[in-house]
């Protein structure tokens, strides 16, 4: 059953986002505990509360997005560890400058 689920996730990613655009290994997505059970959104599908998934220095990071919240954007790795220390504005500037947005998810 788990094998079927992995194939389904890979298929959805490739058809919804285009395999050429995704350019990440399916094993990276499967190993990322923070996103592997999430609902993947299409490029045109947006919600008020979702997470954006980025590829940065070979790792996946999520950044929470909320249209009605006043929150600071903090990139979090697959283990839930923040990329930057709280208040590390320079770190997040570099992240958004160099990270590549891949897709959006809803947990």
Image (spheres, helix red, strand yellow):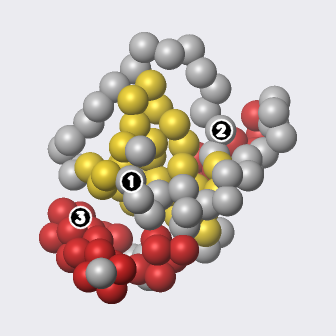
Q: Are marks 3 and 2 in contact (CB under 8 Å)?
A: no
Q: CA distance from mark 3 to mark 2?
A: 24 Å
Disc 1 is placed on an element classified as: loop
Residue under label 3, please give it: 17
- Rate crowding at label 2 as few (under 14), some (14 to 19) or many (20 or more) other CA atoms within 10 Å: many
Q: Which residue is nearer to you in this view: 56 or 94? A: 56
- Residue furthest front in the image: 1
- In front: label 3 or label 1: 1
Disc 2 is placed on an element classified as: loop
Residue under label 1, please give it: 38
User: Horizontal placement of 7 versus 24: left or right?
Assistant: left
Q: Is the residue 48 above or below the residue 93 in the image?
A: above
Q: Is residue 70 among the parts visible in the rendering?
A: yes
Q: Are marks 1 and 2 in contact (CB under 8 Å)?
A: no
Quick one: label 3 or label 1, which is nearer the N terminus? 3
Q: Is the residue 8 above or below the residue 54 in the image?
A: below
Residue under label 2, please give it: 74
Q: CA distance from mark 1 to mark 2?
A: 19 Å
In percent of the image, x 18 and y 63: which residue is there?
16
User: Horizontal placement of 94 versus 65: left or right?
Assistant: right
Residue 102 is drawn in which quadrant?
bottom left
Quick one: label 3 or label 2, which is nearer the N terminus? 3
């Amino acid at each position: 059953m788990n094998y079927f689920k992995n194939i389904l996730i890979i298929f959805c990613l490739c058809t919804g986002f285009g395999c050429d655009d995704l350019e990440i290994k399916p094993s990276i997505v499967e190993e990322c505990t923070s996103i592997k059970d999430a609902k993947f959104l299409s490029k045109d599908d947006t919600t008020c509360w979702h997470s954006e998934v980025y590829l940065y220095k070979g790792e996946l990071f999520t950044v929470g997005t909320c249209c009605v919240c006043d929150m600071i954007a903090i990139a979090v790795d697959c283990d839930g560890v923040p990329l930057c220390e709280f208040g590390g504005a320079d770190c997040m500037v570099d992240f958004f400058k160099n990270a590549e947005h891949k897709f959006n998810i809803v947990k």
